[in-house]
Amino acid sequence: MTLFPTVLLTGALPDASRAHLERHGIVLVDAHEHPDVEVVTAGATPVRGARGTVVLTGAHPSPEVTALLAAHGVTVQDAGPGRVTLGRPVPLPSAAVDLDLLAWTSSPVLDVPATLVLDGEGVSAVARVLRDTDAEGATGPVVVALCDATAEGTGPVVVVSADLDEGPAAVEMLLDAVHAAAADRPLTAEPAAAAHASDLVQHPAWLRLRADVGALRALQVKDGSIPDTDAHPEARRLAAAIAGAVSTLVPFVPHDEDYLAAVTKDLARWVDDGFGVPDFLDSLVLFHPERLRVDGLRHLVLFPMYTQNGSTDRRFEAVLLEVRWPEIVAHLEATRFSNRMFVPVRFLDFTAGYDTNSAVLFPETVAVREVPVFTWGAIFADREAARFRRVVRAAAETTRLALPPDAARLLDDQRLAEETFVLWDLVHDRTHMRGDLPFDPFMIKQRMPYFLYSLEELRCDLTAFRHAVALERDGVPHARYVQYAVLFDRIFRFPVTGTRVRNYDGLGGQLLFAWLHQHHVLDWTDSRLTVDWPRVPDAVIALGEQIEQLYWRSIDRPKTAHWLAAYDLVSATLTPHPASVWAGGKAALPVDGLPKDLTDAMLPDEFPLSMFYEALARKIGDVVASTSGITA
Ligand SMILES: [Zn+2]
């Protein structure tokens, strides 16, 4: 099963159309290669070798095409020659959420040789002739129709009676039609490695190890020590059992042998020293997942550590994970986006500190006597992808957003979403160290007003987005999915996740939404969210440029002046809390004191949720909460 649909072409397509399909990952195949979709060009005879079908029809289709369409309740009518503007049908206020097959076109003007008469159960209008006399909506004859998959096993059929031979709108419509016709193809299988990982996940030594670490955690206090001497005999027994289980599991992860040998030594020293604050520096410096980035390579990790967005206590955690290193990411990392520290991973199994919202494994979180040089950072793409899919699905349904057909696939397919997040993270992660930065990127954790973190995280995401727009032009098939992921995760999940206390990621999402809304790229009208997709890339990139301009100017500014300018950038789009001191500007703020005084003057929720987000949070809050500990 390929990640992207395979297509059998019946008849010829213009070069531009073929190239556009291929740039987005569509693979053109022969009839015997089990295509997902057959594209029947105007005048051609269908082969009927695929489940899904796209029919491009002129005024006089062949008898075979006429019969195929008749079976779905579609009749073709000669429209006479004419160029018309197409529009989406006006949705009924109560209508369910549909796919948007015109997503990447804005009122396309096309030659329409025929129109469609629909008379069947599972067939609906996707595009109509937009009549001048009816500016409120498109109510003219149907030009594009979607026939649902049938119980008899016929896949979706998309019928297009417009000439898709040339122009940007035509190639986008064809791509969306192919994705819509491929909608019910099977989901992509998990990577092969995951299937045979069960030997390790089910291994008695692992199951015992996981249980013993759980029991040991219960004896530890916040700093990882065990002050209660009555518990020491039990702790000693557990530590010995854990060391034994680790040794048993080493043959499954031979590349981790040195590290795991050091883990058992650190563990023994902790026991001998009387269960004080643990120190796993010696083993930490021997763990190097960044040196062997091979898709499916497994690691056994055992450290006393806290987990970011998870457990704030430094207790033991045991994690089985495997590296995710898709070919496309290996290629892009080697050629364009070098990032030697970046290790994308997925969970195989874990202890309680990861049964949370934590989606990273960072060496910074391990208990050590002194801070070493960090050479890697691991991000769990499976968790990112799974919670993205669940939350965005709920948000799209709640806001009745009609999804582009490929975006709908992204929400269905865990593997596609994982690879998308790996590519996004690759670029995001390295961006923290790149660009015209007014601050030392390694000092970013300094105490400062939280909206500065919002801007830095947003800058990295919008940079990833900007690169994705360029990569899409270059034919990287994941690139458009990265754009969907950045946009949807940012505007739907971030603002409604976490508390309202210095929620810097939430604030970045609020800013992106409000920016797009105020530029009318995104509208909330008639209780339905709509997105003007062709204008999205420029609008998103423009916000990224604002932040880059701020950074560049601030290289020449004192720190507090940078903070004030950054506040102006955010508050130009987002409304501060009415009680805000910062909103009063220089006159109201303690600008003659220490920077710390300015930070203290910031309200915990300086930019409260808008009414749109308050409603959204109420409606999908349970779904967001349900993603704690999720992996697929
Ligand atoms: Zn970041």
Image: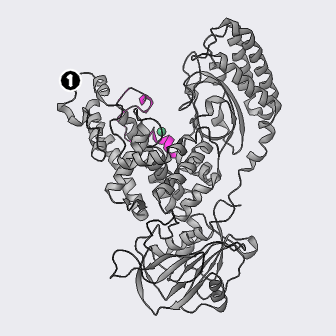
Q: Which residue is mark 1?
A: 592
Q: Can the viewer see residue 337?
A: no
Q: Judge left or right: residue 292 versus residue 364.
A: right
**Quarter placement of the N terminus:** bottom right
Name the one closer to the observer, 101 or 449: 101
Q: Which residue is at a point 71% across and 75% down the rendered structure image?
A: 30
**From what the image shows, is residue 492 above or below residue 125?**
above
**Residues drawn in magenta:** 427-448
Q: Residue at x 39, y 39 (%)?
A: 454
Viewer-proximal residue among 98 and 466: 98
The residue shown at (36%, 31%) is: 604
Above or below — where is 435 with respect to 155?
above
Helix, strand or loop for the magenta stretch, by majority: loop
Tell me, yes or no, whether the highlighted magenta stretch contains residue 509. Answer: no
Is residue 372 among the parts visible in the rendering? yes
Specify whether 182 is left or right of 205: left
Residue 429 magenta-highlighted: yes
Callout 1: few (<14), some (14-19), or many (20+) C-alpha neighbours within 10 Å? Answer: few
Label 1: which secondary element: loop
- The correct choice, above or below, for 392 with respect to 365 in the image is below
| In the image, the residue with mark 1 has its CB under 8 Å from the nearest atom of ligand 1 | no
Q: Position of residue 179 (x, y in %)?
A: 58, 67
**Snapshot quadrant of residue 239:** top right
